[in-house]
Amino acid sequence: MSDMLEGLSILVTRPASQAKTLIDKLQQLGARAVAFPTVEIQPLTQSPEFISTIKNVKDADMLIFISRNSVKHALPIIKQEHPSMADQLKVAAVGPGTADEIRELGVTVDIMPDNQYNTDGLLAINELVECAGKQIIIVRGEGGKEQLAETLSKRGAHVSYLECYRRALPKNDISGALSPTPDLIIATSHDVLQNLYDMTPEPLREVLLECQLLVTSPNMVELCETLGFSHPAIVAPNASDEAIIHALL
């Protein structure tokens, strides 16, 4: 088992704070995995909007955390501002990685999809199907997707956002990461993949587009095709370390 990925060179493009555990697991399987973050996470917790919105947590019935970063940047401040939050509301996580971050901060996770770790998985959970009249706060990055909020609103919930971080384009030089050409590039979100393309200068685009990709949802396949990648992407069912490794094996 320890050498199932022996010699495979893998570029992991997750934000730096989230890449280490995956890289460690890939290296344990024999891969030569390295980090090349294509998204930089910038906190927004000092913004007037965040400071204003966090006061509304006391009136909420549920908080939904849709990423590890949403937990990392918002939950410590929520706990500080509202020490009795655990007794007042339910906490939902989009997947096991997000749930682990919540539990590490001493907060119970009440709601999480069984296996579909995305918006559709959340929306299938009974507490989010029968949510009319509930005050729900979605904790997320700036400018995320609207499907979750729109669907919950149609079901009768009162939905607001607590945006606690911004995704930015790093100023990293990709030339070293593409020479020699990696055997595989792992992209775990649309932003990560789009930024990977945008960070690649025109003379290196042909090299990038010949690389084999692994993406973490069927929805990302269309972006791969739009950007012009030559090979069909390997698709993991979600962005957990376990799902990614299983897709490779």
Image: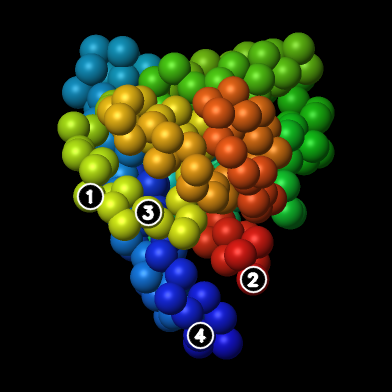
Choose mark 3 or mark 2, whichever is in front. Answer: 3
Instruction: For label 1, count other residues whose C-alpha is less than 10 Å away and answer few (under 14), some (14-19) or many (20+).
Output: few
Are the two marked residues, 2 and 1, in contact with CB atoms closer than 8 angstroms? Answer: no
Looking at marks 2 and 1 on the same chain, the residue that comes earlier in the sequence is marked by: 1
Closest to the camera, between mark 3 and mark 4, is: 3
Helix, strand or loop for disc 4 = loop
Task: Return the residue at label 3.
Answer: 181
Three-letter code for the amino acid on which mark 3 is drawn: Thr
Residue 176: assigned label: 1
Question: If you read the primary sequence from the N terminus, does the residue marked by circle 3 or circle 1 appear first?
Answer: 1
CA–CA distance between discs 2 and 4? 11 Å
The answer to whether residue 192 shows anywhere in this view is: no
Amino acid carrying mark 4 in the image: Asp
The answer for how far apart the CA atoms under marks 3 and 2 are is 21 Å
Q: Secondary structure under badge 3?
A: loop
Q: CA distance from mark 2 to mark 1?
A: 27 Å
Q: Answer yes or no: do the residues labelled 3 and 1 have beta carbons within 8 Å?
A: no
Q: Position of residue 229 (x, y in %)?
A: 55, 35
Left or right: where 33 falls relative to 112: left
Question: What SS does tag 2 mark?
Answer: loop
Q: Position of residue 173 (x, y in %)?
A: 19, 39
Q: CA distance from mark 3 to mark 4?
A: 21 Å
Please name the residue shown 55% across and 29% down the image: 228
Residue 209 visible in this rendered orientation of the protein: yes
* Residue found 31% across the figure and 13% down from its top: 49
Residue that carries the numbered disc 2 in the rendered image: 249
